[in-house]
Image (spheres, rainbow, N blue to C red):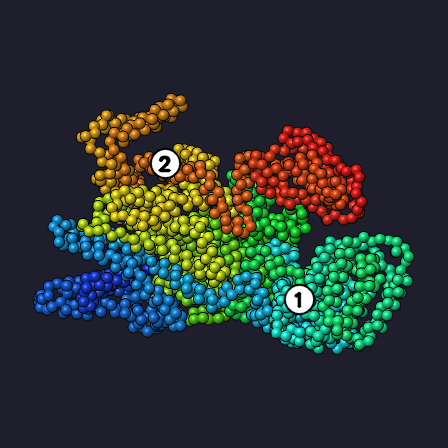
Amino acid sequence: WSRDCLQYRYSVDDPSERDIEDFAGVTAPMPGEGCKPITEGMLAAPKTFLEKRSWLRGVMAMSRIVEWHIVTFYLLSVLAFSHDLVWGWVYTLKVASGVFWLFNSLAICWGLLEVWSSYPGIHLSGTAIFGSVFVLVARFLILVYQTLYLTWTFGPGKGSYLGIEADATFWWWQYVWLSLLCMTPYILESLTNLFPVVTTMLFTSRNDYIQTFLNILFPISRLYTGKEMHESFGHTAVYVFFWATLIAWKLFFSYVFEVYSMVLPTIQLTDDYANFPDQSLLKMSLLLVLRWLPQFIVYCIDMSIWYAVWQAFAGTSVGFSDHLGDIRSIKDIRNSFGRAPEHFCAKMLSPDAGSRRGSSGSILASDGNSMEHLDSRKQSLSNPNLAEGQSLLGNDPHKLQGYVNRLLDVRIQKWVMFSTVWNEVIDHFREEDLISNLERDYMKFSRFDGFSQAIYLPVFQTAGVVEESLALLERPGDDDEHASDDTLFAPICNHVTMRTAVSEVWELGCYVLLKLLGPVHNDDAVYIMNYVLKWVESGTVCDHVKITQMRGVVQSLIQLVGVLSKGVSRRKPAASRRSTGKPKARKEPSGPPARGIRRAISANSLASAEALESTRPALAEDVVIIDALRDSTRDKFRALINSIKGMMNASNPESKDVMDRLTFALSMENGFFWDDAYASDALDDFARSGIVKSVLTKLKGLVACHPDEVEPKSKEARRRLTFFVNSLFMDMPNAPSIHDMFSWNVLTPYYKESVTLSKGELETRKDALGVSTMLYLQTLFKADWANFLERLGLQDEEKVWNKKYAAETRQWASIRAQTLNRTVSGMMYYEKALRLLANMERLDEDTTNDLMGEKFGYIVSCQVYGQQKKDQDPKAEDIENLMHRFPHMRVAYIDSVRDIRSGQMAFYSCLVKSHSNEIQEVYRVRLPCNPILGEGKPENQNHAMIFSRGEFVQTIDMNQDGYFEEALKMRNALQEFAKRDGPMPITILGLREHIFTGSVSSLANYMALQETSFVTLGQRVLTKPLCIRLHYGHPDVFDKLFFITRGGISKSSKGINLSEDIFAGYNNAIRGGQVAFKEYIQVGKGRDVGMSQIYQFEAKLSQGAGEQSLSRDVYRMCHRLDFSRLLSYYFGGIGHYFSNVLTVLTVYVVIYLMAILALYDLEKIGDRLITPMGTVQMLLGGLGLLQTIPLFSTLGVERGWWASFRELVQIFATGGPLHFMFHIQTKANYMTQTILVGGAKYRPTGRGFVTQHTPMDEQYRFFASSHLYLGVEMGALLIIMGIYTEAGQYFGRTWSLWLASLSFLASPFWFNPLTFDWNIVTADYAKWFAWMTAKSGGATRSWSVWWNEENGFYKKMPMRSKLWFVIKSTLFLCIAEGVARSSLLEADMTINKPMIPVSFVVAAIVVFFVLWWLLSMVEHLMPYPVRRTIGIVIGIGLMTTITTIFIEDSNCIRYGLAAYYAIGAMCQLGLLAGSKFVKTFYFVHDLVCGHIIFIPLFLLAILQIPHHIQTWLLYQNALSSDVVVSNILRYARKSQESGGTTAPNEDLVEQISELRKLLYKQEQMIESMGGGSSLGLNRSNASTDAITKLIGQQSQEPMQIQPNVYARQTMTGPVGMGGRTYSASTLDVWGDMAMGDDAQSGYQVTPLQVPSHSSTGARDFTFTQPTDMPPR
C-alpha cells in the first residue's frame, strides 16, 4: 500500500453519472486528487509474482524437498556401491563429498528457475537484481572450480594442475574448503530449522545491516507476508522428532529395497562395456538411466506411505490422550453415566447456572413452584390415598428421606441440571424421528410431582440392575444363615446405580401398590411398609426375611406390572364410579405397631368393612361387571402377596404380623380382591392418571426389561449419544456465562440447490429405474419412517400428503437429503441450545431474546434469491418459509437493478429477514460492479460478510448438518480463541466432521470412510504434533476481525482459487495466525455417493491442487516454513496429489521399460542369469495396503480394533482396492491436465441419491480419456511383454500392474448398479453403438462431437507441455519397431507360397478403402437402399481381404500390430499439430476399446450369477443397516419391464388400498366376535380367498387390475390393517394402511355388502356375512 492508492476511486462507474443524491459529498473526490477508477491503477501496478503454467512452478515451491530426495538418493547409492565394491572409508568419503557439488548445482538450477519465473513482467528492485546476479555468478565460479578439483581428485595419483604438482588428497581438500563456502547458507538454514524463532527474529529485525543482507541474498524477506511463521521450541522438538524417526526408517528401507538391489546390474553393465569390444556408451548409459529411473521415482513416492503409517501412530496416541473413543457403546455410557453430571456441570455450565447457585426451581417446577414448595412436598414415599402433600408416614421418625439421600450419594442439584439437558437431547431425537415414543420414555430421566426424589434415572441406565442385585444376593456365601445386613447388602450399597435402582423400585412399587389397593387396604399396606423401613433402618432385614426367596417376589411383581402396563394403556374408564360405599374415617397410625397390636388393627379393618357393606345398595349385588384386566390383575396380585408371605420368616413375631395382615387383605370382602366394583374403579383411576402410566412404564423398565430391550435401535442415535457422553470427559474449556461468552455468526453460501423437497420431487420417478425419492428414503430410513408415522399418529401412509401433514412429510424427507433445509435446521439448534443454557442461568425471556440477537446470528448467502423471487421459483418460497420458521435467520443476496439514466446494471448486496410473517429488507449496499468474478462461491461468502455482527464467523457448507447436543458445546469451543498455545494467536478453530452418507452403498461407504480418516485423524495429526493444519474447508470458525483486515476468508480469482477454502489457510499461515482443531464437538457432512459424483469431486480437488502448486501463496509459504513443517505440509496436503502423479508415472515407466527390455532382448545383461525386478511390484502393492493404516487407526480409536479390522476386511471384499486405485489415476490425470493445459473449473457434483444404472455411453464419455484408454494400453503392453519375456516369474512381476489395469477398466462398471443384467447390457450396447455412429446432436448424442470437445485442449497447449506427448509418441514407435523386427508369427514365404499374392490383396484393401472414402463423400446424394447396399458390399469386401491377408501371410499379423502402434504415434503427433485426418483412426481405436469392455460384460451377463453377487456386494453396507436396497432395484427393474417408468396409476393404488382394507375389516369382525375354530368360523371362503390371492399376488408377472373394480364399505367400527400390498416386484410399495382404534366390546356391526363385478383379469367375488352372531 502507498499514498498513491488515494488517487483512485473505488467504483468503476463515474460518481457524476450516478442517479444518487450526495448531499454530504461523501462520494466526491478529495481536493487535489484525481478520480481515475481503481482498475486503471491495478492494470498499471507492477506485478510481484507470475503464475506460470508449468510443472517447474511446483518444483520451485518444493525445491527443498526435491533437493533432499536427490541428495539422499546419491548418498545411499554411494553407500551401496562402497559395500559391494569394498571401498575403504577414505575413498567412500571422497565419493560422498560429491554431494557438495550436487548442492551447488541445484542451487544454480533454482536461481535460473527464479529468472525464468520472473520474466517477463515482474517488477524487481535494483538490489534484488544485483543480489540474484551476484549469487548466480559466485556459485557458477565455485562450481567450475569444484568440478576441476573433484576431477583431479579422481585423476592419476600424481599430476601438475594450475602449475601445482600435488596428489589427489591435496586437490580433494581444496575442493572441501571451497565447498564449505557455498555450503554456509545451508548450514545456517539447518540451524534455523531447529530453532525457527531465529528466522522470525531476523526477518522482523530493525537492524539496517541485517535487512540489507537479507534484501540482497534472501529476496523473500522483502515481502510484507511471511514474517512470523514460527512455532514454540516445545512444539518444534515434537515434530522434529516425528520426522527424524520417519526419515531414519525411510532411508533404511529405501537402501535395502530400492538402492542396493540396483548395484549389481549397474556393475554388470559397466563391466561389459569396459571389457567387451564394440560396446556403445550411449546404449549403456541409456540402459542405466532406464533401470535406475523407476527406483528413483519410487524413492520419491514411498515417503508418503511411511507418512501414512507414522500419521496413524501419532493420530492414535493423540486420540487416546484426548480420551477419544473412551465411550463406544451404550454399555460404556451406562458405566460412565454416574460421572457424567459432575463433568457436565463443571465444563458446560457457567458459574451463573442454577446448580452452582444452589437453586433449581426454574428447572424442576414447570408450574413455577418454588424450591421451598417442592421441599414441602418431598417425602420418603408418596401416598396417593392421602391429601396432597400429607406425609404418608406421619410423625414416624424412620423416614426414608435420609436413607434415599445416602443411597444416591451424589449432588442432586447437578443431576437435576444434567437431567434437564439430557431430556432435551432425547426430545430432539424424538423430533428428528430417530427414536420411537417408547424408546424416548426409556431414555429420559423421570420426574414425578411430590415424590421423594427430584429425578429418577432413565430406564436404559437401570434396566437389568435389579436382576444383577438379585444375583448378588443369591451368590453362595460362607455363612449365609447368620450373615448381617451390612455384609449381605454391601455390594449393592457400594454400587451407585444399584442403590439408586433398588430405592426407585421400592418407592415406585409402593406407590403403584397403594394406588391399586385404594383406601380400604391403606392402613394395612402402610403398616407393612413401615415394618420393612424399620428393618432396613435397624439393619435386621436378614432376621425377618428369607433373602433367598426374593427372586420369587420380584418375578411376581414383574408379572403384575406387565399386566397393568399392557392393560391400562388401552383401558377406557367408565363414565361413573361403580362403587358407592365409603370407608369410615380412621385416625392415621402414628408409627410402627408394637407387639400385640395386630388384633386391634384387624378389628378396626373389619368394622370398616362391615360399615362399607351396610351402605352398599342391594341392587349392586345383581350387577355382574365383566372386566378381564381386573381379573388378571387380581390373579397376579394374589401371586405377589403369596410370594411375599413365603419370603417372611414365620418364627419372627413382626414377620408373622406382616403375614397375618397380608392374609387378611386377601380375604376382605369389600377390598380389592373380592369387591368387583371397587377393583374396577381402582383400575379406572389408574387409567385416568397420567402419572400412574409414567410410573408404570418406569417400573416396568426397572424390573422387567433387559438392557438390550431399552437401548435405542437407531445406529445414528447410538452414535450421537455415545459421542456426546464421551465428549463430556474430554478436555474442553469451561463455559462462561451467556453474558460473557464470545459472539459468533454462522454463514452458509447457497446457489441453486434443493431447499425443501417438494411432493413432486419426492414422488416423481426421475431415473430409468422408476424409483421415486420418497420410496428410496422410506426404504433407506425404514425405522425413522415408522417413528415419523407414530409421531403424527398416522397408521395410513396415504394420509401423509393430506394438507395437515404435507409440510411435515416434506420436512422429514428434506432433513434426510442434502438440502438447505437440513443445514438451516441443524444450525438453528445453536439458538435452541443457547436458550436452554440461558434458562438454566435463570435469565428472563426478554433478556434471553436480547442476548440471542447479540450472541448468535445465522446468515444464509443465497446468491440468486433475488432472481429466483423475480422468476417465481418455488425455491424462493421455500427459503422464505425457512425465514418464517426461524426469525433469527437472515438471507443475504446479490440484487441487480438497471440504471434508468445510464442503462447499466447496478448491483447491490442485500439482507432480508422475516418480520410479522412478512419478508422485510434490512440493508441494501451498492456494489461497484458485478461481484461475481470467479467461481461464485467465494464472492457469495465475501459479500455477506459485512452483515455478520459477531466476533467470530463459522462457515458451514450447504451439505452439512448440526446436532442439538453438539450445539450446547459451542460456547465452550469459542473459548479456545481465548487460549494461546504457542507464539501465534489462534485465528482458525477447526471442528470435527461426521460423514452421514456412508450407509447408502459400498461406494458411499468408501467415500465416507476416506473422508472420515481425513477430517479426523488427518486433521488431528496436522494440528498436533505437526502444527501445520490449514483451513481445508468448512465447518471451521474464523476470527472475523483478523480475517477481514487481511483479505477475507475466501479468495475468488477464477481458476487459480478453485479450491477457495485452502487459500484462507495459506493466508492465515503467512500472516501470523495459528490453527487449532478440536474433536469434542462435531458437525455432520454429506458426501458424494455415486461413481460419477465421486469422480467429479476428486477431479475438482485434483485440479484445485494443480492450481495451488502454481500460486504465490504456496510458493511463499513453502520458502518460509522450516524443513520439518514443509515436509508436514507437503505429505499432509498437496504432496498427496504429487504422489499420485508420480505413482502413475512409475506405472508408465515400469511397464514400458519391461516391454522394451523384453522386445529388444535386453532383459539379460550379457549371458548372465536374469534377475527379475520384484521390488517395484512390492512397493506398488504396498502403496495401496499401507494407505489403509490411517483408516484402520481412525476406526480403531473410535470403534475398537476388532470393529476396525472387520470394516477393512469388508472394504477389501467388496472391491475397495479397485475404487482407491481407480481414483489414484483420477487425481493424477486431472492434476496433470490442469498444470499442462489449465481449464480448472468448479464441478457441481449434485447432492442427490444414486441408485440408478448409468448407461454405458455416459460411462464411456466420463472415463475414456482418463482411465479406459490407459487401462487398455497397459493391458496390451503387459500381453506383449508376456509374449516376448524370457525372465520368468511373469505373474510375480506384473500382478500389481494387472490389478491397476483391471481397476481402470472395471471400476466404472463394477460400481454401477445392474451392470451385469442381460437386458441392461444389451440395451447399453445398442445405446453406445448408436452414440458412436451418430454424426451430430451434441456430445451426449454423438461420438464425433464428444471427441472434438474432449481433445480441444491440445490446441491451447504450450509447446513445453507438448514435449510430454512427443515422448509418449516416441515410446509407441519403439514398441512398433520392436514388434516389427521380432520373430513373432514369422512365416517363410519361400517355402509356403501364398495362393493369392499378398500384393494383390493389399491392392484390394486399398481399393476398398478408397471406395469407402468416395461413398462417404457422395452418400448424401444417393437413395437409402443404394447407399446401404454399397456400404454392405464394401464392408464385406474389407473384412474378406483383411482376413485373407492374415491367413495367407502370418507376418502381416505382426506387421499389423506394429502398424497399430506406429499409427498411434503418428495420430498423437497429428493431434498435437491439430490435424483432422487422425479422427478416423481414433474412431477405430474407440470401437476396439469399447468392444474390449463389452465382450466380458456380455459373458458375465450370460452367467447371471455375477449380477446377484454385484448387487449384494455393492449394497451390503446398506443391507447391514436394515436397508433393503436390492428390493428397490428389483422393484425398479420390474417397473421397467412393465413400462412403469412414470408415477403409479392413482386409481390403481386407491383400488388396491380399498380392497385390502375391506378384507382386513372382515377378518377383524370375525375375530372380535370371538370367532375361532371351535365356532366353525375358520373355514375357507371362496370370495376372501380370491381377494387374498389377488392382493397378496407375488408372482413375477405384472399384476393387472382393471380400474372399474371397486368396493364400498358400509360399516361402523374399527378399520383394520391387513396384509401387505405388493407391487408386481413383491416390494411393499405403499406401506402400512389405515387402522383405527382397537376393537372394544359393545360395538354394533352392520352386515357388509360388496357388489359383485366381473372384469377382465379379476375373478368375480362376493362377501357373505354369518347370520348368527356368537355371544360376547
- Distance Cα–Cα, label 1 vs label 2: 73 Å
Which amino acid, mark 2? Answer: Leu
Residue under the point 44% across and 61% down: 1193
Q: Position of residue 617 (x, y in %)?
A: 90, 58
Residue 908 located left or right of residue 497: left
Residue designated by label 1: 456
Q: Residues within 10 Å of mark 2 (few under 14, many from 20)?
A: some
Residue under the point 79% across and 69% down: 660
Residue designated by label 2: 1487
Residue placed most toward the observer, 956 or 1654: 1654
Which amino acid, mark 1? Answer: Tyr
Name the mark nearer the viewer: 1 or 2.
1
Q: Residues within 10 Å of mark 1 (few under 14, many from 20)?
A: many
Res. 404 in view: yes
Residue 1483 located left or right of residue 471: left
Among the 4 quarters of the image, the one containing residue 254: bottom left
* Local secondary structure at mark 1: loop
* Local secondary structure at mark 2: helix
Q: Position of residue 140 (x, y in %)?
A: 20, 62
Q: Position of residue 1463 (x, y in %)?
A: 28, 38
Q: Position of residue 1074 (x, y in %)?
A: 43, 66
Residue under the point 44% across and 34% down: 1326
Res. 375 in view: no
Disc nearer the start of the sequence (1/2): 1
Residue 961 located left or right of residue 620: left
Residue under the point 20% across and 28% down: 1393
Residue 1431 located left or right of residue 416: left
Q: Number of labelled discs?
A: 2
Residue placed most toward the observer, 1418 or 1492: 1492
Mark number, residue 1373? none
